[in-house]
Image (cartoon, helix red, strand yellow):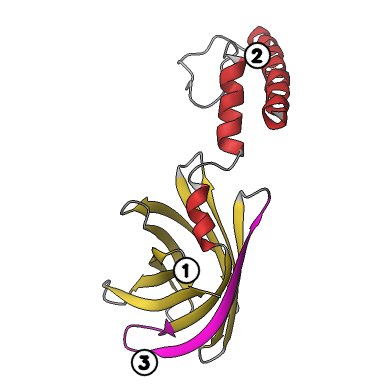
């Protein structure tokens, strides 16, 4: 397997460099006063095969990326949005396209939500961080200048993903917590509901998008 061979070679070089550096540093440095954290760096005598397995696990897409496969393709959107808990709901229709990038490590989304008082477009990148063991999301859009990042977990037999994040609210000048839940109805439909904490601290629904496959 070419990928595994590449990582094996890289790991072998890495171990060699690590051992050399350790020998030099031990000659120059005084004895440590406390035991180092074994989880923060590779041990000099670590098994190369194990290092290769770790590199493959953290560097290659795995089983958790398969859930994101349900989100690929071109979609029609039905969007409901409100600026705050007291504001009226604005509805629109839009489109969305998602495709794999970087060897199916990440999913790129191009989003056109139609007109929600103003034209609303956005870009997103979704992935799964094998080190943190959580889904990841990065979002930018035409309604602000911030980059919003979130971490997600799979729930209910992986029929939904819940993302937790924070973003700046230009209306209040404060940071708000957000919770986004993507629920997979079937292979051709899923629903995103975004919740936000209001001025009273209570959560309310700020956005709902129904995705129907074209």
In this rendering, the answer to whether 28 lies above or below 143 is: above
Q: Is residue 90 magenta?
A: yes
Which tag is nearer the camera, tag 1 or tag 2? 1
Label 1 element class? loop
Residue 139 part of the magenta-drawn span: no
Label 3 vs label 1: CA separation? 29 Å
Identity of the residue drawn at 49% across and 88% down: 92
Circle 1 residue? 188
79 with respect to 42 (left or right): left
User: Image height check: is 45 above or below 55?
Assistant: above
Where is mark 2, residue-wise? 22
Q: Residues within 10 Å of mark 1 (few under 14, many from 20)?
A: some
Q: Position of residue 161 (x, y in %)?
A: 40, 58
Where does label 3 land, which residue? 88
> Count the marks: how many?
3
Q: Earlier in the sequence, mark 3 or mark 1?
A: 3
Q: Residue 144 placed where, x, y %?
A: 57, 76
Quadrant of the rendered image containing residue 25: top right
Distance from disc 2 to disc 3, alpha carbons, whole Å, reads 64 Å
Mark 2, other Cα within 10 Å: few <14 / some 14–19 / many ≥20: some
Are there few (<14), some (14-19), or many (20+) residues within 10 Å of tag 3? few
> Does residue 15 appear in the picture of this structure?
yes
Q: Residue at x 58, y 43 (%)?
A: 61
Quadrant the N terminus occupies: top right
Percent position (x, y) of residue 189?
44, 70
Q: Earlier in the sequence, mark 1 or mark 2?
A: 2
**Segment colored magenta:** 80-102
């Amino acid at each position: 397997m070419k990928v595994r061979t590449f990582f094996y070679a890289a790991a072998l070089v890495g171990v060699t460099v690590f051992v050399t550096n350790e020998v030099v540093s031990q000659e120059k440095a005084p004895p440590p006063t406390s035991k180092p954290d074994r989880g923060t760096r590779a041990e000099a005598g670590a098994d190369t095969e194990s290092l290769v397995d770790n590199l493959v696990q953290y560097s290659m897409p795995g089983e958790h990326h398969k859930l994101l496969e349900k989100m690929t393709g071109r979609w029609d959107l039905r969007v409901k949005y409100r600026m705050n808990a007291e504001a009226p709901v604005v509805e629109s229709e839009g489109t969305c396209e998602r495709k794999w990038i970087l060897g199916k490590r990440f999913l790129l989304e191009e989003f056109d939500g139609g007109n929600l008082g103003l034209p609303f477009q956005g870009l997103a990148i979704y992935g799964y961080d094998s080190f943190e063991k959580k889904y990841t999301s990065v979002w930018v859009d035409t309604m602000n200048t911030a980059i919003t990042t979130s971490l997600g977990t799979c729930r209910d037999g992986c029929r939904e993903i819940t993302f937790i994040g924070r973003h700046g609210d230009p209306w209040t000048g404060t940071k708000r917590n957000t919770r986004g839940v993507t629920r997979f109805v079937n292979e051709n439909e899923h629903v995103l509901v975004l919740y936000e904490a209001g001025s009273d601290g209570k959560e309310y629904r700020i956005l709902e998008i129904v995705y129907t496959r074209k």
